[in-house]
Amino acid sequence: MEKIRGIYAAGLSVLDENLALDVKKTIKHAENLIENGCHGVAIFGSTGQAQLLSVSEKISLLNDLSKSKYKDKYLIGTGLNSLNETIQFISISKSLRFKNFLIMPPAYYKYGDEEVFSFYSRIIESHKDIQIILYNFEKLCGYKFSPECVKNLNDKFPSQIIGLKDSSYNLFENLNIPNFSMMPGSESKLLKGLKSGCSGIITATCNVTSKLARKVYDDFHNNIEQTENEKLCKVRAVFEKYNLVSAIHSFLGSKESIYNNILPTLSILDKEKKDKLILELNSLDFKL
């Protein structure tokens, strides 16, 4: 079992003018993130519009992603509500030699710990040779992981349930499991998390903050005085005033127009909000 650690971006999906997934540019974007400080990239998470993309597009990207020079640095999100489709998608991913997955419980229906335990158990019964980062984001799926559920899953499947992305922020400071990757979903939680024993972060805004976040991470582990954490947190706070996916696409779209393409029901920021976003980031002396 490998522990996942470091700075991970929740990678964007780049779309063409017809709103079809641009496979090559999405992969190039992910590779650029790794070359600019990220230890890895989560593909097809919520930031990557996973629930809005077709399965065929996802498979097409995986085929090319399997040839990437950074193949071992990717977490593959499933972004599917269907248990059987999730199992099938993992089968395809495994055939391309991907083994690390970021999996959120299904959205829409109401359920609790027992049902979540059953959901992940069935995935692992079909795929005993994978590693799973649980995705804790109540705002999106309607369920918030309890400490007991995470512990029970890890106790039952210690080789498969290896970590958790905490975007609900109810676990990262107080749930300590040996050899378990706890990764909050915000740069503002990075330093606090590291001090609490967390392994790093997986965040949307690392699509633009990778260098800053990596500096904070490295300085912590090298016992160097922090010089960039305050700026990193302020940049994150600016983006959090808006829908994160919309704001990041809008910011990147000001440099390269293809990033303005986004799937409904998401949208880029209107001109007034976009101008305000860029003005606030400029005031922090933040540029790509």
Image (cartoon, rainbow, N blue to C red):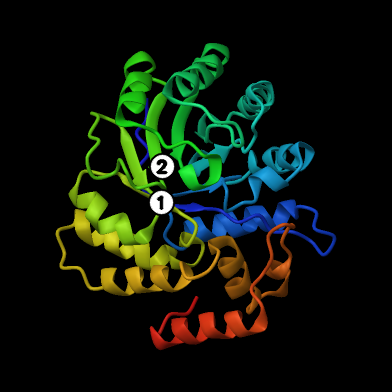
Residue at left 42%, top 24%? 113
Rendered view: 20 above or below 210 = above
Residue found at the far right of this picture = 18
Label located before the other in sequence (2 or 1): 2
User: Which secondary structure lies at badge 2?
Assistant: strand
Which image quarter holds the N terminus? top left
- Residue where numbered disc 1 is placed: 185
Q: Residues within 10 Å of mark 1 (few under 14, many from 20)?
A: many
Q: Given the image, on which type of amino acid does mark 1 rest?
A: Gly
Image-quadrant location for residue 14: bottom right
Spatial separation of the CA atoms under disc 2 and disc 1: 6 Å
SS label for mark 1: loop
Crowding near the residue tagged with mark 2, few <14, some 14–19, many ≥20 C-alpha atoms within 10 Å? many
Q: Which residue is mark 2?
A: 165
Label 2 amino acid?
Lys
Q: Residue at x 68, y 60 (%)?
A: 266
Task: In this rendered view, identify the residue nearer to me: 69 or 156.
Answer: 156
Query: What residue do we see at 51% from left, 59% from top?
Result: 33
Up the image or down, 89 lies above or below 48; here it is: above
Judging depth in this view, the residue of 107 and 26 nearest the camera is: 107
Give the image location of residue 71, x and y in percent.
55, 41
Q: Is residue 223 left or right of residue 80?
A: left
Q: Nearer the viewer, residue 69 or 286?
A: 286
- Residue 280 in view: yes
Q: Check whether the beta carbons of the residues at disc 2 and disc 1 lie within 8 A of each other.
A: yes
Where residue 181 sits, quadrant-wise, is: top left
